[in-house]
Amino acid sequence: STADIGVVGLAVMGSNLARNFARHGFTVAVYNRTYAKTTDLIDAHGDEGDFVPSEELKDFVASLKRPRKAMIMVQAGPATDAVIDQLAALMEEGDMIIDGGNAHFENTRRREAALREQGLHFVGTGVSGGEEGALLGPAIMPGGSEESYESLGPILEAISAKAPDGTPCCTRLGPDGAGHFVKMVHNGIEYSDMQLIGEAYDLLRRGVGIEPADLARIFSEWNSGDLDSYLIEVTAEVLGHTDAATGKPLVDVIVDQAGQKGTGRWTVQNALDLGVPVTGIAEATFARALSSGVKQREGAVDLLTGPTEKAAIPDGFVEDVRQALYASKIVAYAQGFDQIAAASAEYDWGIDLGSCSALWRAGCIIRARFLDRITEAWRSDPDLPTLLAAPEFTKIVTDAQDAWRRVVATAALAGIPTPGFSSALAYYDGLRSRRLPAALIQGQRDFFGAHTYRRVDREGTFHTDWSGDRAEHEV
Ligand code: 6PG
């Protein structure tokens, strides 16, 4: 046995990861259900390092050094379970199976528990950065046992992206599902970020009338400041691209129905279970659903009218939008971190938020310059009640709030939907309100369901006898 690590599943992500391992000097065992994929990889890239191809899974397992490390890059769901079962049957105590796909963290918890019974390690790990990241350095978010990380960690860290200060963007985040959970929230934040950028684009395009080529320049400019991030960079690229067939901006010939594979939805579903308001991620996920709700859109487009008066666009609106985008983005990250903290407490994962933000600084889709500042914020005070309470972020959002309000107000007057900007601002205003109408909701609940309430001036739980003499009783 010579292989340091093996990869099962050689679609693009799997083969790029295998090549990344090989390019870093590791001997990599490779296996794919259809052997032709394996030989294709070796034919095209065999000279990049040491590959050990196997046609049979048992030979693949036999080619791995102990403790064996087999990384599976197959479709989430039943395909993953099938491969795990086959591998587990061939492995021995102390060996590990690493799932690098976008698995649901509950499945990861279940699989980890089952394999632990068999004396095997199961490491659910998030891998972000798309196809290019897999090859050149992804951000890697492993969960699993401490013991597994001792021998696996150095290999994953070697192939991971490196943050500007040189640290590997790979850290063990906690036991069992912790890694896949963090990757799920990463994707939720990705949805939110993309939605906010989309709204900024829409406001400047439809509201102000700026053409895509000029917008590409604006986004590039933004990318050299606080908003510096991979998603803004990608946005400039897409907006600047002309469709070869029609000569139109490509963005104008793409069907405006956003797809999704499920990680955003999972994030929102879990946030509802944990009771964490991730409004930005929820709005972004629903906005994708609205865009794809063809029946409703077609049925309404000619019936529902927009504003009767043309909205005035305030001077300096482009800069207002930039600030609203920055502030809303900070809210989205703050909410995502709250969800990670809540899950960490719920599942006893001990996730360090500073490590999460640090490892998102390079390689992953949401990589952004301001993650340096977020990392510092969590490191200087891990008990911050919200990211918005970190002095630097308090200042950014409060400085941005006037611009942010102008943007949301203008959007409403212009009839341009900005669920991301609006919900982020509502969240900000919700947090800073000394009194919320929740007091009234408690009164209503007590009225129709005797659900009781607490008082601001006394300890205890109370109920008013609404249908009788309306006297208050302590319960
Ligand atoms: C990444 C991406 C990656 C993928 C998602 C998003 O971190 O590299 O998040 O995991 O692009 O699957 O997919 P959808 O937008 O299709 O849900």
Image: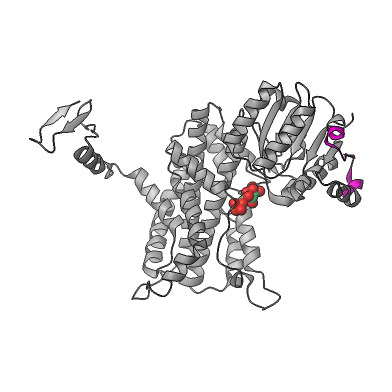
Q: Is residue 373 visible?
A: no
Which residue is at the front of the view, 66 or 93? 93
Q: Position of residue 423 (x, y in %)?
A: 41, 53
Q: Is the residue 462 above or below the residue 408 in the image?
A: above
Magenta span contains residue 49 = yes
User: The magenta stretch spans which residues?
Assistant: 45-60
Quadrant, the N terminus: top right
| Image-based side of 448 in relation to 411, left or right | left
Name the residue rendered at 63%, 40% in the picture: 103
Q: Is residue 58 visible?
A: yes
Q: Position of residue 92 (x, y in %)?
A: 78, 23
Magenta span contains residue 126 = no
Q: Position of residue 114 (x, y in %)?
A: 65, 26
Name the residue rendered at 62%, 35% in the picture: 179
| Image-based side of 220 in relation to 296, left or right | right
Q: Is the residue 313 above or below the residue 466 in the image?
A: below
Which residue is at the front of the view, 339 or 113? 113
